[in-house]
Image: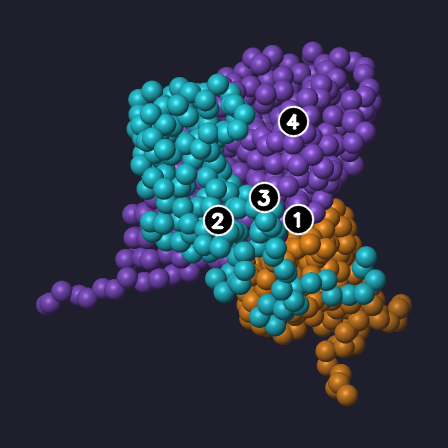
Chain colours: A orange, B cyan, C purple
Amino acid sequence: MGFLEERFDDNIVTAKVDQLLSWARSTSAWYFQFGLACCAIEMMATAASRHDLERIGMMPRSSPRQADVMIVAGTVTLKMATRVKKLYDQMADPKYVISMGSCANSGGPYSRAGYHVLKGVDQIIPVDVYVPGCPPRPESLIEGLLKLQEKIRHERPLTKKK
Amino acid sequence: MIINQKVSDIIEKQFPGSVILPEEPQNDYIQLLPDNWNEIAKFLKNDTELKFDSCQCITGVDLGIEENLEVRYNFHSMKHKHKIEIRIAVERKRPSIPSVEQVWRGADWLEREVYDMYGVRFKGHRDLRRMLLPEDWKGWPLRKDYKTPNIYNGMKVKKVRKGWD
Amino acid sequence: MGLVHADEMTLNIGPQHPSTHGVLRLKVKTDGEIISEITPIIGYLHRCFEKHCETLSYEQIIPFTDRCDYIAAMNNNFGYVLAIEKMMDIQVPERVKYIRVIMAEFNRIASHLLALGTFGLDVGAYTPFLYMFRDRERILDLFEITCGARLLYNYMWVGGVSHDLPIGFVEASYRFLDEFEKNTKEYHNILSYNKIFIERSADVGVLPKDVAIDYGVTGPNLRGSGIKWDLRKDEPYSIYDRFRFNVPVGKGTMGSVGDCWDRYWVRAEEMNESVKIIRQALDKMPRDGDVHEALPKKVRPPKGSIYFRTESPRGDLGYYIISDGKGGPTRVKMRSPAFTALSALSEIASGWMLSDVLVILGSLDIVLGEIDR
């Protein structure tokens, strides 16, 4: 975290502005619930009483303009693909995408003989974290989200990019 | 089921020439000609002894590349609790059948699905368009001679990465 | 002042919207706030189930039937497996029959809990959703100790089931059933007799009897309109004729017969009836037996076709299977109950306000995976 240890009293914290911003952003990433198929039920179960997503800072939003993370949960078909791209474009920067389940990763069980299934959502939008499973357990999804938080925490939003 | 044989005789009496008799006697289904299917359907629904008021399922079937297409109907009566199966064969080149969507309202979407998957045109259907696939999709997927397209609107349809087998 | 000129407006709801139960698009023509015409557009989850089945063997199709109606996966498996066993004339052992009924009824309770929870969410109540998911997680725990999966099981095989019940399952089930009966009273206090809920759902979206039969609507939607039709009693399959249970029917307690409250109430009462069936099955089940005894070496039904229907939590689920005598089917068609229920939406939702449409849609309890296949 970059605290300077034991130089000051316990209730004074020092950090670089960059790291403070990244820490704040990573622990309050609101997600855009884009549940398409069976994985949507596991996403709802992760947000419900037993495994709670709000304790890691994620709140469900239904509009893409208010969300930071888009969780693509379920099979993306060719008829739906244009809408996925449109919704991704409507999200404001900085934005992240989690591909949940085998169908969104690579087409899943339908990858061999589905004439209407898009083989992986990364054909149309860039993906940050892939969560495998059919459907992934709520614990797996939380692990994927924690990895995303780690990725956000290592960003440096204020340094000039070359 | 004995009921299929009985209903087949009743239909033949009302509409002579519509029932195609099978080679060996059987009780599983009734094979009809498509010509006056609409009138037969109204008779099946309104006749007090038959009263088939519930259309359960409409299935399109492709028996093989050399054979015809077929549309199979399953009907059930809530009052008398009996059920029948009716099969109507259509040719592959220009398949067409009279529609029964004004007789049973539930047949509306079921017929649209058969049109979407097989290309069978239902004469008299008020809104025949594709249901499950996009409007600009080419081809009838559930036919046996269908080939999956390679690209649809700029997206690759088939498996994309090597080594996935 | 002359007359104010007003045009109809065409709105689009979906395919992504927090209140739709999946990816459903509704094209709505409104005159102010009142709806004059509504058209559902589906197909956004069409995963080519029927074409895919023609390239697979009979056993390989079972996991794919799970994924069609992903909320009640055991019931999907059940219908398919019973159809094939009828074609091949296989007799399964008694213990397998009881296990199948127990699993199917547990899944019916889990499916109704989710349906009622999301219905409350559509109306605006967030708490019942969390309470119902607490109970649903306990049922999913029971499934997990049996076959390892929480949502999509691949549990019922042709001629048997995949895993036997583990030690401790029967005691855990009894404990769960005792607690669940107390919780149903809690749900009635929170949601069913809540004044706001009654005002939003009573007398809204009435489905008359003859319209329901004409459209082919079945299941709790039909029973909410006052018609007593349940396939478990009227065309009994498996061992349902050995159990004693009632069939709840909508009576118009809070409004007219066939409104949204009636359909909600039928589902809530059906959960209690399922608890009765499970208790009787757990009492009568034979204590030992090999569940893999009747598994055939090769699943090859004789040439022919069959149409078999069972009662899933959404209505009657039908499978039309045509077999050629080979290892895989020629044609598998799944007749889904939510498909016909959704086709009736354009008739019962016209004339209501925009916010009522979502209540009607929630009360029909549709699952897009089953509609699009």
On screen, C173 above or below C339?
above
Query: Mark 3 Cα within 10 Å, few/some/many (few <14, many 20+)?
Result: some
Type of amino acid under label 3: Leu
Q: Quadrant of the N terminus of chain C?
A: bottom left
**Mark seen at residue B91:** 2
How far is disc 1 from disc 2 in space, using C-alphas? Answer: 24 Å
- For disc 1, the marked residue is C52
Q: Nearer the viewer, residue C175 or B81?
A: B81
For residue C321, say whether it is visible. Answer: yes
Name the amino acid, label 4: Met
Nearest to viewer (mark 3 / mark 4): 3
Q: Nearer the viewer, mark 4 or mark 2?
A: 2
Are discs 3 and 1 less than 8 Å apart at CB? Answer: no
Q: Are marks 1 and 4 on the same chain?
A: yes
Q: Amino acid type of disc 2?
A: Glu
- In percent of width and height, residue C89 lies at 68, 22
Q: Badge 3 is on which residue?
A: B63
Whether discs 1 and 2 lie on one chain: the answer is no
